Every structure is written in structure tokens, then in C-alpha cells.
Amino acid sequence: MVKLDILSDPICPWCYIGKAQLDRALEQTPDHPFEIEWHPFQLNPEMPDGGMDRREYLEAKFGGRDGALEAYRPVVEQAEAAGLDLALDRIDRTPNTLDAHRLIHWAGIEGRQTAAVSALFRAYFKDGRDIGDRETLADIADGIELDAAVIQRLLASDADRDEIAERDRAAREMGVQSVPTFIVAGKHAVPGAQPPELWLKVIAELRAGAET
């Protein structure tokens, strides 16, 4: 097996697209060599705990309504090309994602990490749910066969908050500036939402190397 580490944030549209592109390649190669692990990277580490109004956030970040629309045009185009239907009009708030990353971490302990990542992407980009809300996160946990009551208790505590924040800082110190970032075999960084063809090429090269 070859480790594929993925740095991602569940409110990052390019991360959602990048996962969909990777999934398409993996579906074509069910005997792929990857062992996948997801790692935290917050797009907005200084976001207030309660998040903020989505429109205010986008207009502040991109210099007004027109800037926000222009910034998201390629996102929508690439999402459609990847077979994703983004319901951006349903998103009311941009959350702080620390708790969402804690859920991904705990799901990993139960072998449900990728399921958690998928569920968070769907909840945010398709259903417009506030994935900074702890009741919402507990419901998502229940939907991927985790114990919602346990997740609620963990979210109400400070469990793993410092660890997630430290892993985020460590990624930045390594030079990661944007996500998604894929790291193959702990050596080769592949930034951005890459097409399935690239992943098929990587898989073929890994197989060829294993056979030599």
C-alpha cells in the first residue's frame, strides 16, 4: 500500500472537487494502492466560533459582490465538469471548521474517516447545512454509523482541539499554503484539484515501480 495524505477543509470547494476527481480515478482502479488519510487545514483559522454570514464573508474576502461572483465562476464550472451539483444559494453561514475537523479525526479512529469527509462536503455544499453547529455534526456522525451521543459529549469538551490546531499549524510550517494538497508516499506533493487522468497516471507509475 502507498500512503496518500490529503490536507483539506470541508468548506473548501476545490477540496470537494478534488475529492470527486480522485474518486473517479479510484472507481476505475478498484485495486489501487492508496491508503488514504485526511488531515486538517482550516481556510479560516481565525473565524469566530459561531462563524459568520456567508455573503458578508465572501464580499469581504473578494472585494464585493462582483468579486465574489467572479471568484466562484471557475468553481461552479469545475464542479459541473466533475459531476457535482453545488447548491451555493443554500449556504447561509461560513463556519469555523475546527469541530468538523475533530469529527473527521474521531471518525478516523473508527475507520469512517472518508465517510465523514464525504458527508461533511454533502451537508455543506449540497444541503446548505451549518457544519459548525454541533447538533448538525452529531447528526452527520449518526448518518455514518458513529455514536451521536458520544460525538456530542466530545464536541462539548475540549477533546483534541489543541491537537487539530497544532496539526494545522504544522502543515503551514511545512509550506502548505492552500488546499487540497495531496502527498503521495510521504514525498511527493500534488497541489490542487487534479483531473482523474493525473491520478490514473500516478497509479500506473506506482504499479510499474512495484513490479520492478
Image (spheres, helix red, strand yellow):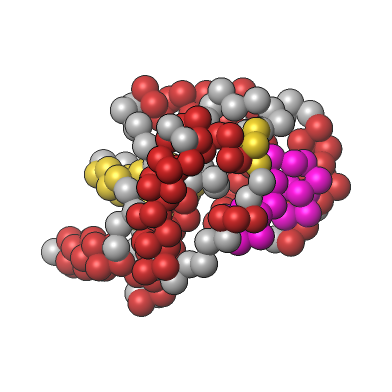
Relative to the observer, which residue lies in front, 102 or 93?
A: 93
Instruction: Look at the image and tell me in which quarter the N terminus lies.
Output: bottom left
Q: Where is 101 relative to 44, above or below?
A: below
Instruction: Determine the image quadrant of residue 171.
Output: top left
Q: Where is 70 relative to 42, above or below?
A: below
Picture coordinates of residue 209, whole percent (x, y): 17, 61
> Taking the image as drawn, is residue 23 in sight?
no
Magenta-drawn segment: 121-140
Q: Where is 122 relative to 8, above or below?
A: below
Picture coordinates of residue 76, whole percent (x, y): 42, 59
Relative to the observer, which residue lies in front, 14 or 92?
A: 92
Going 60% across and 40% down the picture, which residue do you hit? 54
Picture coordinates of residue 118, whole percent (x, y): 57, 59
Predominant secondary structure, magenta span: helix
Side of 138 where 67 appears, left or right:
left
Side of 177 where 166 appears, left or right:
right
> Taking the image as drawn, is residue 80 in sight?
yes
Picture coordinates of residue 62, whole percent (x, y): 43, 35
Relative to the observer, which residue lies in front, 3 or 10?
A: 10
